Image (cartoon, rainbow, N blue to C red):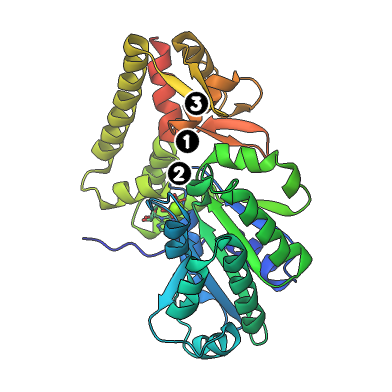
Amino acid sequence: MKRIAFHNREKETKEIMNILDSEPSLITFVYGPINSGKTTMISHLIKELPEEYAPFYVNLRGRFIADYEDFLNVLFEIDEEDGGGNVVEYAKLALKDIGAVSGIPIPINLFEKIFEKKDKSKDMFRYIEQFFVEVSKTRTPILIIDELQVIGDLKIDGFLIYKLFNFFIRLTKELHLAHVFVITSDSLFIEHVYSEAMLEGRCRYLLVDDFDRETTSTFLGEHGFTDDEGALAWECCGGKPVYLLELIRADNRGREIEKLHRMRAGELKTFLKTLKELGDKITVKEECYDISYENIVCALKMFPDEEEIDMWSIDEISKHYLVRNNILFLDPDRGIIKPQSRLNLLAIREVMSSA
Ligand SMILES: Nc1ncnc2c1ncn2[C@@H]1O[C@H](COP(=O)(O)OP(=O)(O)O)[C@@H](O)[C@H]1O
Ligand SMILES: [Mg+2]
């Protein structure tokens, strides 16, 4: 199989490097449509970071987290060796050979101690803070949590997410101890964060969108596309890296574009047919609502000429439903809603023209 090298995301990488250059003071929320390349960009950046930084990356994607035990197991990388008895000693040891860690290193004995405690979150945060204090004597710690929305609804003595937000504020704004990056593809989660009073003035937002036109054409050019082929690919598939990879790998590019289209339009038709005939419900803020097929169609019909619309122009229930089903993407920072991809936009236009 053709291996496709990482294509540089210069603008976004520069923005992150600027953030890393200054003292930690805000939480950074990295958001964007699904498959836009957020994880890929961060993973690449982690590998390229200068020695002076110590990144700790945790990905909650696909992890089933129902309680503290699950969460602690994902957050920490357990070191089976007894690490010298306390966090200060252990941090000194761990720092010597810190490689690409997935999670915050912790010796098993201290990990078990946290488990024994009634208020686990307090001890977990205390450990991380002390560990980062040690790390920060020689390097700048960076905590990166990917797909944090996975624990968005998790309630154990109150919502875990709020305790985490408080802790992140402490690490950044209060102690200036570590950089904190939260990554998510869930735009309803970002909308929630955006309207959260406790985070006001304590975070910033960084959009990692699909490639723009220029990046797409350079990327495809590097893989042997002519200008015309590149223009057609952009016109039909936009700049979503996963689709571009499909095109690069395809033997027949024209046929691949057609196939991607047929598939997307087919999926949307099935989705709407099922909704029309069987109906559906959605839970928003712990209340259950019926989905109105007519309202959904009405919302989707707003894209005949526009590529993006004002986020207040769709009713709340339809908005939640279409975003949750990955048809639309919501950007609260810019106040807009748009299809998750150009392929989705074209599928919406096609299906709506006969609805
Ligand atoms: N900069 C890039 N260069 C090359 N391929 C990329 C790039 N960004 C993303 N991709 C491809 O797109 C896929 C989806 O990207 P990913 O980072 O998982 O998206 P996200 O985390 O935003 O959902 C990746 O598996 C990778 O194959
Ligand atoms: Mg990702």
For label 2, count other residues whose C-alpha is less than 10 Å away and answer few (under 14), some (14-19) or many (20+).
some
**Residue 139 position within the rendered picture, expressed as x and y whole percent measured from the top left:** 63, 83
The CA distance from mark 2 to mark 1 is 7 Å
Question: What residue is shown with label 3?
Answer: 283
Residue drawn at (37%, 48%), measured in percent from left and top? Answer: 242
Q: Secondary structure at mark 3?
A: strand
- Residue 177 is left or right of residue 4, and the answer is right
Question: What residue is shown with label 2?
Answer: 34
- Residue 279 is left or right of residue 147, and the answer is left
Q: Quadrant of the N terminus?
A: bottom left
- The amino acid type, in three-letter code, at marker 1 is Gln
Mark 2 vs 1: CB contact within 8 A = yes
Which of pointers 1 and 3 lies earlier in the amino acid sequence?
Answer: 3
Which of pointers 3 and 2 lies earlier in the amino acid sequence?
Answer: 2
Which of pointers 2 and 1 lies earlier in the amino acid sequence?
Answer: 2
**Residue 171 position within the rendered picture, expressed as x and y whole percent measured from the top left:** 69, 66
Question: What residue is shown with label 1?
Answer: 340
